[in-house]
Amino acid sequence: MKKGLLFIIGLAFCISVQAQKKESSLYIPLTDSPEVTQLKAVLVELAMQNPALKVYDNKAKIARYQQNKATAGWLNMLQASGNLNEYTLKNNSNNATFFPRYNFSLTVPIGSLISIPNDVKIAKTEKKVIMNMKEEEQLKIKADVLNAYELYAANKKMMELEVPLLEDVYNHYKQTEEKFSAGDKEVSVETLNIAYRSYNEEMVRKVMLERDIRQAKIELERLIGISFEEAVLQSQARTFNK
């Protein structure tokens, strides 16, 4: 009885393991080649020089200036004044006691004890907010440039697959046209039209793919600031120098 129970448990375990293997086989790991990984890194680095990010750097400078301005509010409380008269001009030490050459005073408005520290904190917080916004924009640009590259690469691959299909339908159409022109009774007008439509459909698909490739390339170059070909050369140079 116990042996039978153990056998059933073992069988159930084997079936479960096989099911898990079958399920996991559906998830194909997508890994880039070293060349593609290097190219993506170069594209992201170039995208990080996007002028949109420089706006945040300038805003951070403004926040720093505002912080310095707020901190300088403490100095505005200190006032100095001069006192020039016949005694101070003659350096009369006896009367200098009553008529000093310089007068200093410190004015401390009660409200400033609260407003100035808060102004400094606001300026510091604004700078942190700006840097957080910059980091968020950097992540967005990184995702945009990688998505643009993936779209470009996918369309290029689809074009490579499309070319032999287009050649096949073109050759089939030309052969059908030649047979029809030669008076082959097995090739009707409808057969010729079908062959032409197939060829025309593949041509339209090719034109659409070419457009998609150009658009993806334009978007990619907008993000990196240089031509895609230049980026590829930079990536290849890094690989060569390693």
Image (cartoon, helix red, strand yellow):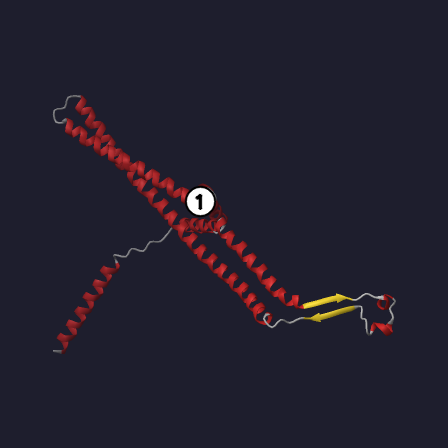
Q: Residue at x 61, y 62 (%)?
A: 69
The mark tally for this picture is 1
x, y (%) of residue 38? Answer: 44, 50
Q: Nearer the viewer, residue 238 or 232?
A: 232
- What percent of the width, then of the height, locates residue 174? 23, 27
Where is residue 237? Give x, y as percent: 49, 46
For residue 29, above or below residue 185: below
Instruction: Please indicate whether residue 217 sits to the left or right of residue 174 in the image.
Output: right
Q: Amino acid at mark 1?
A: Arg
State which quadrant residue 62 falls in: bottom right
Above or below: residue 113 compared with residue 150: below
Residue 209 location, quadrant: top left
Residue that appears at 59% across and 72% down: 113
- Residue at 54% from the left image edge and 54% from the top image edge: 58
Mark 1 highlights which residue?
222
Instruction: Left or right? Give the position of 99 relative to 44.
Output: right
> Which of the 4 image quadrants contains residue 214?
top left
User: Where, quadrant-wise, is the N terminus in this rendering?
Assistant: bottom left
